[in-house]
Image (cartoon, grey):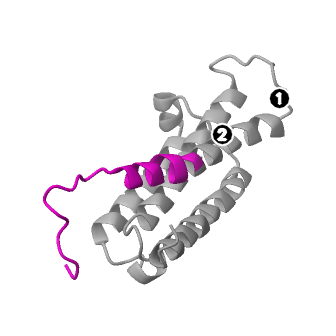
Amino acid sequence: MRRPPRPQGERLLNLSLALRAYLFLGLMEAAAAMAAFLYVLYGAGWRYGQMLAANHPLYLQAITATLCAIILMQVVNVFVCRSSIRSVFSTGLFGNRLILWGVVLEIALILLIDYTPWGNSLLGTAPIPGEVWLFVIPFAIGMVLLEELRKWLARRGLR
């Protein structure tokens, strides 16, 4: 409310926003998802070229890890994208109750999908060990740090 509204002719989705969303943040999310998938597979002794059936427990764990990585990165994304130039630390994490409730619901759902028999059978997932979550957390931290660096550069006109 402190800033004037955008010009009437300005589009909601512009090139700058699309590049930031898909080529910057999106690539980080994709890297985290792919890394989680391969982390589970290689951690269990799988080797490139080895075929796994769609219902193989290892494959189910790998796709569940991928889903968890996407969810975790999206949780981070919702906070870092609240402003295109203001730091996530200056916008605060608790200012929007709807976002907080959405994040709580999202986390509850992913835990139900991952760790309950009905969630596993309904969506074809399998429980993943806690170490997979620990593997993905640095990607989330990296996303925050890189987006904060981008915002810092944008505030200084170095974008």
Instruction: Pick whichever, 105 or 5, lies toward us.
Output: 5
**Mark 1 closeness class: few <14, some 14–19, many ≥20 residues within 10 Å:** some
Determine the image quadrant of residue 90: bottom left
**Left or right: 124, with 49 as reference point:** left
- Mark 1 and mark 2: Cα distance apart in space: 15 Å
Instruction: Pick whichever, 87 or 124, lies toward us.
Output: 87
- Extreme left residue here? 8
Q: Residue at x 58, y 61 (%)?
A: 143
Kind of residue at badge 2: Met
Quadrant of the rendering where the N terminus is positioned: bottom left
**Left or right: 148, with 106 as reference point:** right
Location of residue 50 in the rendering, given as x and y in whole percent from the top left corner: 81, 19
Location of residue 48 in the rendering, given as x and y in whole percent from the top left corner: 82, 25
- Which label belongs to residue 46? 1
Q: Residue at x 54, y 65 (%)?
A: 147
Location of residue 131 in the rendering, given as x and y in whole percent from the top left corner: 74, 54
Magenta segment: 1-27
Give the mark nearer the N terminus: 1 vs 2: 2
Location of residue 134 in the rendering, given as x and y in whole percent from the top left corner: 70, 58
Instruction: Pick whichever, 59 or 148, lies toward us.
Output: 148
Q: Is residue 118 above or below residue 96?
A: above
Q: Is residue 34 above or below residue 93?
A: above
Mark 1 or mark 2: which is in front? 2
Q: Which residue is mark 2?
A: 34
- Which label belongs to residue 132? none
**Residue 38 is a magenta residue:** no
